[in-house]
Amino acid sequence: MYLTDRSASPGAETGQGRRRGAGPRVAPVVLVLGAVSLITDISSEMVTAVLPLYLVTNLGFSPLGFGTLDGVYNGVSALVQLTGGHLADRIRNHKLLAGLGYGLSAVCKPLLLLASSIGAFGTVLALERIGKGLRTAPRDAMISLSTPPENQGRAFGVHRAMDTTGAMLGPLAAFLILRAAADGYDAVFGVSGCVAVFGVLVLVLFVPRRQQAAQTDEASAPGGGQPVRVREALALLGLPRLRALAGCAALLGLTTVSDAFVYLLLQRRAGIGEQWFTLLPLGTAVVFLLLAVPVGALADRAGRRTVFLAGHVGLLTAYALLLWAPATPVLPFLVLALHGTFYAATDGVLPAALAGIVPEQLRASGLAIVGTSQALARFCCSLAFGAAWTVWGDGPALAGSAVGLLCCAAVAGLVLRPAGGTR
């Protein structure tokens, strides 16, 4: 089993010929979807940037309570991704499912103004993540189906770079609103909802309903005009390469500490003031933005398995710095740089690897299977890490995660090893 190292089909050669010709490396629909994600991420990251401090400091949530909510925020979408991916394939309208997902998330942002208990916050966050679960697989399927296999890493890198621009601007906007508004948190939630609505409008107006497939014949299966049945989607689990990819994504997700906990740990270790906390995600986003496209292109050339695993090694290094490095002024920059590098090497590379594995008519379902396995694992990690922090403290909890990540990365390296090489 291996994470597709290169486009393995004979069509890769013709794809290289196209690349030297007039055809663009990145389809226009990728750029439009990137713009939608940029706008939506400004909205989402405005909330994400203030939520840890708001819940723990202002509302007095314990690490376990926050871990539960953070698990809901990052894990509930996993329960919906399979449904969203399958429905998008079945009705053959990826734009419709993506639009419903973006719309639901936009409606939920202002509802945070009304939530003041863990139950209310959990409900609103769950609904918002259901929207994310509905849109993720159809959106990534539109990107994948519009891009030749040999350029998948670059296309997802461009999309993730634009998405990360929003992730960079969101915390900055939240920081400025908190400084300017009297009721800072309420203002952040309100503005976030308005921005999210604008993202939905861009999707509706500028994303075409259908994308012209740009895959090789080898990646396609006959009978593409027939409705996709649940049995056909579940049959994807019979593909050894997809099972290996989904299993390793889940294994590594079990020891991937959520972003919010990383920022809380960094604030404590480096003694960062609360007024600067919302800028920590900005550091991760800047590095992700700078590296997403070049790292995606590198994965297309040098091997997606190698880049994917290297990203987790970078994350493990960040854990080690949080555990043992002295609290010097350079510590936040090093940790955030490694954190951003981790996302650049994994977030777009993982869906890019599916281009040569899953048939076109089942692409959204295949993306949903892998995304669900990873999201559920990270949901479990958030719950476990929050509980471990509450019982044993933040240091032992992070040390356990670091040891687990080292073991899981070693196992993933063996499972995803190419059959005929060691790259």
Image: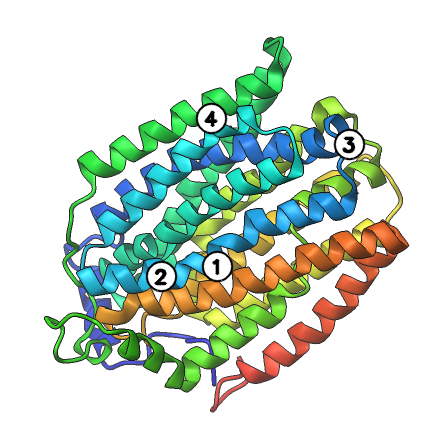
Whether residue 294 is situated above or below residue 380 in the rendered picture: above
Would residue 16 be seen by someone viewing this image from the given angle?
yes
Local crowd size for mark 3, using a 10 Å CA cut-off: few (<14), some (14–19), many (≥20): few
Whether residue 197 is situated above or below residue 312 in the rendered picture: above
Residue under the point 47% across and 69% down: 304
Q: Residue 83 carries which label?
A: 2
Check contact, mark 1 vs mark 2: CB within 8 A: no
Q: Residue at label 1?
A: 78
Residue under the point 54% across and 22% down: 188
Q: Residue at label 4?
A: 110
Local crowd size for mark 2, using a 10 Å CA cut-off: few (<14), some (14–19), many (≥20): some
What's under tag 1, amino acid-wise?
Ala
Q: Nearer the viewer, residue 312 or 14?
A: 312
Is residue 316 shown left or right of residue 143?
right
What's under tag 2, amino acid-wise?
Thr
Mark in front: 3 vs 1:
3
Q: Position of residue 126 (x, y in %)?
A: 51, 45
Q: Nearer the viewer, residue 128 or 246?
A: 128
Check contact, mark 3 vs mark 1: CB within 8 A: no
Upstream in sequence: badge 3 or badge 1: 3
Q: Describe the element under mark 2 as helix, strand or loop.
A: helix
Distance in Å between CA atoms under marks 3 and 4: 22 Å
Distance in Å between CA atoms under marks 1 and 2: 10 Å
Q: Where is residue 386 in the image (x, y as percent from the top left)?
A: 75, 52
Would residue 173 be seen by someone viewing this image from the given angle?
no
